[in-house]
Amino acid sequence: MTKKLSPATLCVQAGWKPRNGEPRVLPIYQSTTFKYDNTEEMADLFDLKKEGYFYTRLQNPTNDAVASKIAALEGGVGAVLTSSGQAANFYAVFNICEAGDHIVTSNEIYGGTYNLFGVTLKKLGIECTFVSQEASEEEISAAFRPNTKALFGETISNPGCQILDIEKFARIAHKHGVPLIVDNTFPTPINCRPFEWGADIVTHSTTKYMDGHATQVGGCVVDSGNFDWDTCTHKGAPAPDGCPSGEERFPGLCTPDESYHGLTYTKKFGALAYTTKLVAQLMRDLGSIPSPQNSFLLNLGLETLHLRVPQHCKNAQRVAEFLLQDERVAWVHYSGLPSDPNHQLAQKYLPNGSCGVIAFGLKGDRQTAVRFMDSLQLIAIVTHVADARTCVLHPASHTHRQLSDEQLREAGVAPDLIRLSVGIEDSDDILADIRQALDKIGWY
């Protein structure tokens, strides 16, 4: 077919292309190893001279089919599945950074990612500067250094639900000759495709909406193929004045890799250089792959992603409108509300809806939020977000409890912030549970 397939069709059919007599449904290749008839064939695979499978830590047909589906949904040239969303964000950065390098990131990101960039990467010799994504382009540019290798942000921040101005961040990144990496977990490619707005690399926690049923933990890194690592430019645009060459800025991609007999990824693999290096080096040395069983479960979730995401958004819109009108609620952040500060950005980047996650606070103190959540019956308190069931979490007490109050404020997490992940149940039942929990709180 020459017609460009819609996201709905890609969700169902992309990735796995069965040949005559093969299974219609993607099989689980639950094997660590793959047989070959002679040593030369195997040697060529280890030298990256041929494509094929020899060990699941590097490649597996089930994993690759699902990665290919996600790449198609995002409009990328290639993708790699990882064992978690955290692994995806780590690999996306570490694939182009080494000790002595630096990255810039929005401070409106998930607490685990904030700690990964601000603490763990620092132990590896990679420094990070956090910036407000609402700051001017000049202010954000001031955070860049000669050794900066990437700019990072989340399309919709977790848990604050702030919308990233992707085009602005892309302009800043490309002005400095580095790629923009965007975590697109919450909207998924059903509601936003960051590559169309200038992003270069996209990451996902596939644990969330892509799986949709809380059955597997996983992540994905997708490359647009639009960043020229040799010239440090996006889509062949003129390089910024004074910008170093790819050999200086991205030596891992643009200079010979002695662990592969002097192979240079950009010369050998072109637009697939980034994802090939990620597999050949990082997966080879660090692992963090998903099991084929987990990828199989993820694929089942992807087949209904285009149906579930609109229902999440429809339910969340109704819940957000209810919370906004309740006098016991102090504030609500949901970009679908016309009064939300991010509504205009959402109209630009997320015209079909954002996601099912709402951030709000109740009048009172931190204990008020705790009493409300403990009174819920249908809605569960879980360390999770973005699956079919409605769930709730208090980030300051749970996912972000490793951060100080100052760090919480920098990350956009107020002590009273409640993260409500609205599922796909009947919205009347969700609202009834919220009402009864609010009624049980002693209001003074």
Image (cartoon, rainbow, N blue to C red):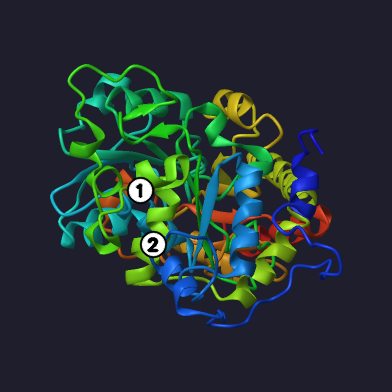
| Camera-side residue of 145 and 312 | 145
Residue at image x 80%, y 46%? 9
**Residue 36: x, y in percent?**
55, 79
Amino acid marked by disc 2: Ala
* Label 2 – label 1 distance at C-alpha: 10 Å
Label 1 residue SS: helix
Residue at image x 65%, y 57%? 210
Badge 2 is on which residue?
280
Residue at image x 55%, y 26%? 345
| Camera-side residue of 118 and 219 | 219
Q: Is residue 440 left or right of residue 419?
A: right
**Residue 407: x, y in percent?**
27, 51
**Residue 106: x, y in percent?**
35, 39
> Which quarter of the rendering shows the N terminus?
top right
* Quadrant of res 31: bottom right
Q: Is residue 123 left or right of residue 396?
A: left
Badge 1 is on which residue?
265
Label 2 residue SS: helix
**Residue 287: x, y in percent?**
39, 72
CB under 8 Å between callouts 2 and 1? yes
| Camera-side residue of 440 and 91 | 91
Question: What is the residue that sits farthest to the right in this orientation?
Answer: 21
Amino acid marked by disc 1: Tyr
Q: Is residue 297 left or right of residue 198?
A: right
Q: Residues within 10 Å of mark 1 (few under 14, many from 20)?
A: many
